């Protein structure tokens, strides 16, 4: 079966990103150091172009149908993929902008950062639109390989190299587990197509499920690793800490959205009929993540490590939404993943801005007295921290609300109570940051330099957390529609 | 004539927007920030007055309602409205914030703009809490309040402020998240977040008891009731004067208001089942905390403990009603109990605010809150001493002041429930007099003890104005409380009717 040319049209955005990434790669080889910013600008243009293409293709499709499966069932275009891709573009664009000055100050403003970043974005797009186990894996590996390399990007930095090596080895094990699980599913159902797997599970899953259940165990373990859920979380703090902050920023933001998409595609669209099997596993993952993330974060003195543990706990919340196994839960988890990526991008973006040539802002103490040094940045960080803690009127509250609501409507009030209990513990280390910024005297009086555009976007990012908190209905409606 | 305007939205958003404007002024415009804060707070107070003048006290229905869809996905609405329970509390809030702004005028030299802004934003949130008729809207305002208060205590507080503010934040956060779970549970049952829908929602006894406990965690921490009161003395002592005033005058009332708006009407059977617990906790607060107050050497701590004891009266008044209903068969005794609690809340708002401001006046001059650092203040500050003694008398429950009215109503109602409740509650008349007047004796009277006191200057015009306004309020409410009780009567009547009917399915 040869795919029709028309069938490629919905992939226009993917094709465009691939072409541009390759073009920038070649072009950058011929650019002198003084004109490195061209690669940066082209990257931003690529993301803009991809956004336009995704949007127009979606508008075209929505006139006829709300879901298209293409290329022999390996690729799907639906509302969810559109919303998630848009979120990936916006957040990645912000991430690249925040990184620019940081990279320049360290003499590593190379085209490769942007090229790898774009390939990562492509990987995320493939994961989001995957409709076949192999496509899922393909997207995941494209993203992961880009990230491994980015972590090692500052090659003279021993800590970063160690982190990259760890990430690579552990990531490979997780990919292996995922593949092993996929092969078992294939053995049981005779297909890699998620729709076909779904059909098989619907017909035979309940009666003949031993090998399927084994496959699910391995898949859940692999997915949990990629999401960074406890007890598969060991890599998260080391990698967040070891990588250059600009790369941590990249890893901590948009890939979470893609990982969420992967979980939905595999567990819900493929193995949704087996949710009675995977819900208990996810409950364990969720509780373990909430406990490990929130409790260990308290003991951290390095803010990147602290935010890494905070990520673990937030991914626990995302899993909490998914395990409710109802529509409200999926859309709640989607809302959570998107808003968390936004908040995380803002938080690490702020750290990037606070760092300067020869100085990394990564100890908690580096935030001391920020309100005296720059009240605007302190206010933004305040919003981000309260959002992570889930205090209204910031968006983090609605994210928690929508997830908890789903959990309760799945008749698991006790689980909601456990979740809020751990979020109280979590609140402590977020407000500790606010305490450092507002109540302590600054130790470091150096002025904070940041480009005008960085400040603008950082401001927009922080205020978006507030604006979405005051009026979350729009994004919530998108998320609900995406899983309709 | 003003009643066509969206008054409730105005009293919520005007101070919040004003607060952000002040932040936008930046750090080099201190005087402009102060003036703007005063203008905004007075404007908000004036706007809140038509809520009272235009209030129809013959009905228990919600008035000045505003409703708009907010988050359709969860059926959450921007729904505001007040009845006789919430309207007086909004007025108390807007009035108190004006005083707080004036009180902080010269005293706060460190970032006055941010200080004023934090208070104004908090005022908006507090008004929102009282006006919200949608549970999620309520929760958003309820939690949102924590952020400015956290900063106020932490930035402008005393030496141990960081410990105090983190304790304050975590305690209140702990209480409220379980309330969130209860609210979502009821949303799941009723498919609505409207508080009035929750009131009519049928719930099994088990569910009611669990919901009641979840609410209790939230409101008991806020009130605060023994044994979860320990954050209050710390927060009060370390907070700047304005922060203490807002905490005592309004934040504590929010817990009491929560019992009336949520716990009692939503889970009446659960409340009835557990009323012994609340009554017990209230009586312990009244008696035991009264003794604790007696031994304090720090004035702010003493007033903080006295606040806990007085709030014990409020919760006692609210929860003896089940016994009264059973004993008398009629509703009048129960109405008396709840109205007594409400009057006590408003009156305590004035009195404790005044007491904290009084301590603040002395602290600004001597920089000590220790009782031992004072003595003979009356010789150097006669005007101040007059006011302070008046407020102390009111705190002790002297007839003719507002402090007497609420306590008397609650004790009277308690007699209809159980003699021993009334007996224990009445000990506060002795204990309250003992700890307050003993402090007054040591601080105000006697010979001048040291050069600090000898060099004290009497009240300036600004301080005199605040004290005079509060004195008028305390005396007016003490001599003629009828306007207040009339306003709330229909709502309380309706509440008692509602509670006396079982909600079991």
Image: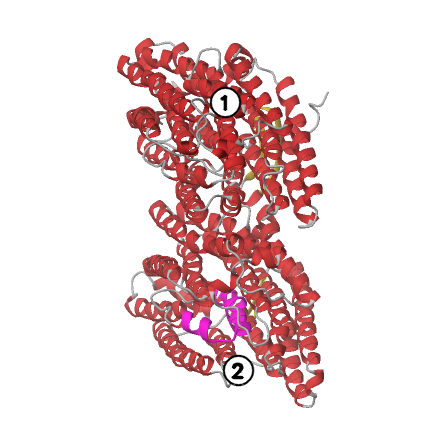
In the structure shown, which secondary structural element does the residue marked by tag 1 occupy? helix
Answer with the quarter of the image where residue B414 lies: top left
Task: Please tell me whether residue B133 is drawn above or below residue A162 in the rendered image.
Answer: above
Taking the magenta stretch, the answer to whether it contains residue A88 is: no
Q: Position of residue B127 (x, y in %)?
A: 57, 32
Task: Please tell me whether residue A195 is drawn above or below residue B445 in the rendered image.
Answer: below
In the structure shown, which secondary structural element does the residue marked by tag 2 occupy? loop
> Residue under circle 2?
A154
Q: Position of residue A89 (x, y in %)?
A: 62, 67
Q: Position of residue B126 (x, y in %)?
A: 55, 34
Q: Can you tell which of label 1 and label 2 is closer to the viewer?
A: 1
Q: CA distance from mark 1 to mark 2?
A: 72 Å
Q: Residue at x 41, y 35 (%)?
A: B370
Question: Which label is found at residue B378?
Answer: 1
Taking the magenta stretch, the answer to whether it contains residue A240 is: yes
- Please tell me how crowded label 1 is: few (under 14), some (14-19), or many (20+) other residues with Cα within 10 Å: many
Task: Please tell me whether residue B52 is drawn above or below residue A422 in the rendered image.
Answer: above
């Amino acid at each position: 079966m040869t795919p029709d040319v028309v069938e490629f049209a919905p992939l226009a955005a993917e094709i465009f990103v691939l072409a541009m990434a390759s073009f920038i790669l070649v072009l950058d080889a011929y650019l002198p150091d003084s004109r490195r910013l061209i690669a940066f600008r082209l990257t931003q243009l690529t993301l803009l172009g991809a956004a336009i293409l995704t949007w127009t293709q979606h508008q075209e499709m929505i006139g006829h149908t709300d879901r298209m499966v293409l290329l022999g069932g390996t690729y799907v275009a639906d509302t969810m993929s559109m919303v998630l891709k848009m979120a990936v573009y916006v957040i990645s664009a912000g991430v690249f902008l925040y990184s620019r000055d940081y990279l320049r100050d360290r003499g590593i403003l190379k085209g490769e950062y942007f090229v790898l970043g774009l390939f990562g974005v492509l990987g995320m797009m493939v994961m989001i639109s995957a409709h076949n186990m192999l496509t899922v894996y393909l997207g995941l590996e494209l993203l992961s390989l880009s990230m491994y390399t980015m972590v090692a990007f500052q090659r003279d930095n021993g800590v970063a190299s160690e982190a990259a090596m760890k990430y690579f080895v552990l990531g490979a094990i997780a990919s292996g587990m995922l593949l092993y699980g996929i092969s078992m599913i294939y053995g049981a159902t005779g297909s890699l197509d998620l729709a076909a797997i779904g059909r098989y599970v619907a017909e035979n899953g309940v009666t003949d499920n031993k090998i399927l259940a084994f496959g699910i165990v391995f898949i859940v373990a692999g997915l949990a690793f990629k999401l960074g859920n406890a007890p598969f979380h060991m890599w998260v703090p080391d990698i967040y800490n070891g990588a250059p902050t600009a790369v941590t920023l990249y890893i901590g933001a948009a890939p979470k959205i893609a990982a969420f998409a992967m979980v939905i595609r595999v567990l819900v669209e493929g193995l949704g009929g087996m949710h009675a099997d995977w819900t208990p596993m996810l409950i364990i993952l969720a509780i373990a993540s909430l406990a490990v993330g929130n409790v260990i974060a308290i003991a951290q003195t390095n803010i990147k490590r602290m935010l890494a543990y905070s990520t673990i706990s937030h991914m626990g919340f995302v899993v909490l939404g998914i395990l409710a196994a109802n529509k409200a839960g999926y859309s709640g988890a989607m809302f959570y993943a998107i808003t968390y990526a936004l908040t995380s991008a803002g938080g690490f973006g702020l750290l990037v801005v606070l760092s300067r040539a020869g100085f990394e802002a990564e100890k908690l103490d580096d935030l001391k007295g920020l309100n005296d040094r720059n009240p605007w940045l302190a206010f933004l960080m305040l919003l981000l921290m309260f959002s992570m803690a889930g205090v209204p009127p910031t968006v983090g509250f609605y994210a928690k609300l929508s997830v908890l609501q789903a959990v309760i409507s799945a008749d698991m009030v006790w689980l909601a109570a456990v979740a809020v209990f751990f979020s109280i513990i979590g609140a402590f280390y977020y407000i500790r940051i606010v305490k450092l910024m507002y109540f302590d005297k600054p130790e470091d009086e150096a002025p904070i330099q940041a480009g005008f555009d960085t400040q603008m976007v950082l401001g927009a990012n922080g205020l978006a957390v507030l604006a979405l908190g005051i009026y979350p209905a729009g994004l919530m409606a998108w998320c609900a529609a995406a899983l309709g | 004539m003003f009643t066509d305007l969206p008054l409730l939205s105005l009293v919520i958003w005007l101070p919040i927007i004003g607060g952000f404007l002040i932040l936008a002024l930046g750090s080099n415009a201190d005087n402009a920030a102060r003036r703007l804060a005063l203008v905004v707070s007075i404007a908000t107070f004036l706007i809140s007055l038509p809520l009272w003048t235009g209030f129809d006290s013959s009905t228990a229905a919600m008035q000045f309602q505003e409703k708009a869809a907010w988050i359709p996905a969860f059926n959450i609405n921007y729904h505001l409205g007040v009845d006789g329970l919430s309207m007086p509390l909004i007025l108390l809030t807007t009035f108190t914030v004006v005083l707080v702004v004036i009180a902080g005028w010269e005293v706060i030299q460190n970032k006055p703009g941010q200080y004023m802004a934090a208070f104004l934003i908090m005022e908006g949130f507090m008004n929102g809490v009282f006006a919200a008729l949608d549970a999620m809207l309520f929760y958003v305002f309820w939690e949102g309040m924590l952020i400015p208060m956290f900063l106020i205590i932490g930035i402008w507080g005393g030496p141990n402020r960081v410990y105090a503010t983190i304790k304050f934040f975590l305690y209140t956060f702990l209480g409220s998240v379980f309330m969130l779970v209860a609210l979502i549970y009821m949303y799941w049952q009723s498919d609505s977040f409207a508080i009035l829908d929750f009131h009519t929602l049928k719930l099994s006894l088990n569910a009611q008891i669990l919901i009641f406990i979840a609410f209790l965690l939230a409101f008991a921490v806020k009130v605060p009731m023994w044994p979860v009161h320990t954050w209050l003395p710390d927060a009060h002592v370390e907070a700047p004067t304005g922060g203490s005033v807002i905490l005592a005058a309004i934040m504590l009332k929010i817990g009491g208001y929560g019992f009336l708006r949520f716990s009692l009407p939503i889970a009446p059977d659960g409340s009835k089942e557990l009323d012994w617990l609340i009554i017990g906790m209230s009586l312990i607060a009244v008696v035991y905390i009264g003794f604790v107050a007696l031994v304090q050497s720090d004035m702010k701590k003493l007033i903080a403990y006295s606040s806990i004891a007085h709030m014990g009266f409020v919760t006692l008044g609210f929860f003896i009603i089940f016994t009264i209903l059973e004993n008398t068969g009629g509703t009048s005794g129960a109405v008396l109990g709840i109205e007594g609690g409400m009057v006590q809340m408003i009156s305590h708002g004035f009195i404790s605010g005044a007491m904290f401001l009084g301590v603040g006046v002395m602290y600004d001059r001597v920089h000590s809150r220790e009782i031992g650092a004072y003595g003979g203040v009356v010789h150097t500050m006669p005007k101040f001493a007059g006011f302070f003694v008046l407020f102390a008398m009111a705190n002790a429950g002297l007839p003719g002041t507002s402090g007497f009215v609420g306590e008397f109503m609650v004790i009277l109602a308690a007699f209809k429930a159980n003699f021993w409740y009334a007996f224990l509650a009445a000990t506060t008349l002795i204990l309250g007099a003992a700890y307050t007047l003993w402090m007054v004796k040591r601080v105000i009277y006697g010979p001048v003890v040291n050069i600090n006191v000898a060099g004290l200057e009497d009240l300036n015009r600004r301080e005199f104005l605040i004290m005079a306004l509060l004195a008028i309020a305390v005396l007016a409410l003490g001599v003629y409380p009828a306007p207040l009780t009339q306003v709330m009567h229909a709502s309380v009547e309706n509440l008692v009717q509602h509670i006396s009917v079982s909600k079991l399915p």
